[in-house]
Amino acid sequence: MAKVLLINPSYDASYGGTKVKVVNPIYPTLGLSTIAATALQKGHKVEILDLSWRPYDFELIRNRVLQTKPDIVGITATTPFMNQLRDISVLIKDISKNILVIGGGPHPSALPEETLHETMLDAVLIGEADYSFCDICDGYPLSDILGIFYRDDDQIFSTKQRPLITNLDELPMPAWHLYNITDYHKISRLLCKRLPMTTAEFSRGCVYRCDFCASKITMSLGYRKKSPERCAEEVQHLYDLGYREFMLADDIFTSDQKWAKQVCDAIYRKNVDIVWTCTNGIRVESADDSLFKSLKQSKCYRVSFGFESGNDEVLKAFGKGGRATVEQARKAVKMARDAGIDSNGYFMVGLSTDTEKTMQETIEFARTIPVDMIKCSICIAFPGTKMFNDYIDKGLVRSFDWDEYMIYTAKNLFTHENLSFDVIQRYMKKFFIRCILFNPSFIIRRIIRGIRTGEFFWDAYYAIKFYLLPTTGNETKSNYYAKERWPQYDFKNRPPKPAHYQIARKSQPKVKKKLNIEMQR
Ligand code: B12
Ligand code: SF4
């Protein structure tokens, strides 16, 4: 049986010292607990080291590795954490070349070949990895495992794409128990009502194609759902483990309204004392009066809407348009308010066709829409998105230093076709000033809500913090272990290609490989 250590990087640098630090999300990472679950089911020993809520600390990782003595280390990474992944891969190989080091999650899935070049990883598992990671633990030769890129000597190979899991009910319960529940009392009280809080998923995938979104790179195009009974069982299981709140990570939970209502009804029937939120933005055209009533009844107290822009043409251009209009957004918020559910609005500036005029429209729209929470970020072309691929094709990407891919502190990542980064940042600052700090209707709404819910003092505490912190530009640097020894990839002269094209054009590997043999570099 394999001994496995899974590592989630530190979020410190990404929220840095900016205003959004007041909503720093600290809860167990679902990706690691789902891959851990299948491995545990097969009898492997799995531990999770979650750095999300602490600064990046390579000594801590080293000590944990020396103590656990794992056969396999798995590291997850979104783009801003890729440099941590690179650093950890070097650190682990310094400890022992015999430890198999595996990468997964959004960034390695988006750029698997480049990721292998830039790290000392032995393999990258692409996309949904619940079963492929288990195959690794079971000791199958890397060349026999579907959905992976791996190295053999100095060569990189890939295997065929793994078919998607069709019946999500077959997956074991995510291994939430591997997290130390007491760590999850640190989350901002603006994000949660009850502690401790965690994440859950009822469905996977999305059928839309917004150009700034990378969700397809891990969960593919399409929509797969767990049965309502299974969803309710997971909620019960979370409660039994001691969690009192969860946020749903699903991309489009409310889009199949009939099923979503059945899920809410099944949770309601379980009568579990746990509250929840749809924190990942739902689509405004999926809002429905009776669905919101069911959500409320099942103890969902907040839905987040991905409004993104206040201009219908911009919405259409990035792939959201159609029924997801500015007018529909107002209707959706009204429905949520009528049902007694809090609403949270996500906005972005610097969308692919944004101009100063459309960003101004976004600000005016956000200022007047009666939501209870608002968040605005700079739209960054993350690897795995159409926007990134388009910018690569047009030669507009200016930096491949993943430490710069921080949406609140980014400076010169790419050349926007209509705007400079300075202008985008200026509008982001303007957004916070006009829509939150000097927006009487938002402030009054928040005060009334605070008094009604008994959360007024938390609001006041975070309001002071929010006011004092800068909007952008206050970078937090990670203290790396071996930056000078990170393997390098020449992105400027060998621009990356979308992962799925790479899979399609690679021939099948001939070399077989055994688990735990020493990697030659
Ligand atoms: C919940 C969520 C969060 C949560 C938790 C993050 C996390 N790492 O789990 C929070 C709120 C913290 C978060 C933050 C951010 N997020 Co986010 N987030 C999501 C969301 C909505 C769902 C993720 C999820 O839990 N899915 C369910 C689980 C089961 O799937 P999974 O995580 O993909 O894991 C599977 C595979 O990826 C793989 N896998 C994952 N990890 C590993 C590790 C190993 C070793 C292996 C082998 C396999 C493997 O196996 C898992 C099971 O199949 C996704 C959108 C999406 N649909 O994927 C965006 C997404 C991952 N986020 C994204 C981004 C950009 C961010 C931010 C960078 C934004 C920012 N603020 O700068 C931050 C980064 C974190 C930070 N704090 O700074 C992008 C990533 C793009 C990219 N190129 O990196 C996504 C895809 C959103 C998007 N629409 O584009 N996010
Ligand atoms: S932003 Fe939301 S709706 Fe758009 S493609 Fe991504 S997950 Fe789907």
Image (cartoon, grey):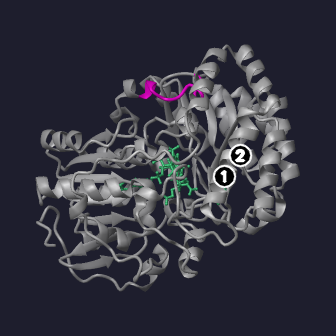
Q: Which mark is residue 202?
A: none
Residues under numbered marks 2 and 1 in contact, where contact means CB atoms less than 8 Å apart: yes
Above or below, 105 against 375 in this view is below
Image spot of residue 481 (x, y percent):
22, 51
Q: Quadrant of the C terminus?
A: bottom left
At 52% from the left and 63% from the top, the residue drawn is: 412
Part of the protein shown in magenta: 184-193
**x, y percent for residue 123:** 29, 66
- Residue 138 visible, this angle: yes
Amino acid type of the residue tagged 1 in the rendering: Arg
Q: Is residue 39 above or below residue 519?
A: above
Relative placement, left or right, of 270 versus 291 is left
Q: At 63% from the left edge and 34% from the top edge, which residue is drawn?
A: 277
Q: Quadrant of ligand 2?
A: bottom right
Which is more toward the observer, 364 or 138?
364
- The location of residue 476, given as percent across then percent down, is 41, 44
Q: Is residue 351 magenta?
A: no
Q: Note whether residue 252 is visible.
A: no
Residue labelled with disc 2: 430
> Which of the pair 80/178 is nearer the observer?
80
For image coordinates 41% across by 41% down, the residue present is 12
Q: Which mark is residue 426?
A: 1
Q: Secondary structure at mark 1?
A: helix
Front-most of residues 91 and 460: 460
Question: Ligand 1: does it lie within 8 Å of the C-beta at label 1?
Answer: no
**Mark 1 crowdedness (10 Å alpha carbons): few <14, some 14-19, many ≥20:** some
Number of callouts? 2
Please give the name of the residue rendered at 66% of the width and 72% of the height, measured from the top-left corner: 417
Looking at the picture, tell me which residue is in the foreground, 345 or 507.
345
